[in-house]
Image (cartoon, rainbow, N blue to C red):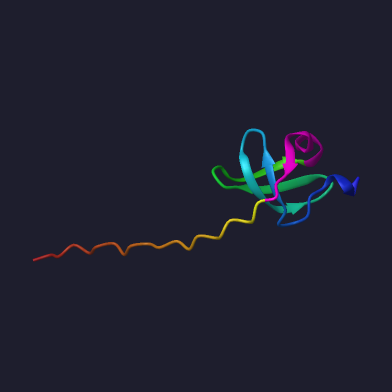
Amino acid sequence: MASNTYSQGAQVEHQKFGLGTVLSSSEERIVIKFDDHGEKKFVTTMVMGSLKKSDRQPPAEKKGSRKKKATPITA
């Protein structure tokens, strides 16, 4: 049954959610971080028909840049 699981870091494409990266995978569950839909958890046996391997390179992680909140000036 282990042949039905994808390894961590594998690039996959889902029919509904598009391109994503496998975060973790077991015989029971698979967790995928999709580019446009965030992290999703699936029952492995139910999602395998909707997944196919993708040959794209993993997307570069974006580093969040937060602006500091402006502090109001009180007089």
Image quarter of residue 19 = top right
Q: Which residue lies furthest to the left in this view?
A: 75
57 vs 65, nearest the viewer? 57
Report the side of 46 relative to 67 (left or right).
Answer: right
Q: In which quarter of the image is the C terminus?
A: bottom left
Report the side of 42 relative to 16 (left or right).
Answer: right
Count every numbered label the image shows and give the total. Answer: 0
Q: Where is residue 4 in the image (x, y as percent from the top left)?
A: 85, 44
Residue depicted at x 88% and y 48%? 3
61 vs 56, nearest the viewer? 56
Q: Residue furthest right?
A: 1
Q: Position of residue 16 (x, y in %)?
A: 63, 33
Residue depicted at x 91% and y 45%? 1
Q: Where is residue 65 in the image (x, y as percent from the top left)?
A: 40, 63
Magenta includes 7? Answer: no
Provide the residue span drawn in magenta.
44-55
Residue depicted at x 79% and y 50%? 6
Q: Is residue 42 above or below residue 22?
A: above
64 vs 29, nearest the viewer? 64
Q: Where is residue 66 in the image (x, y as percent from the top left)?
A: 38, 62
Magenta includes 53? Answer: yes
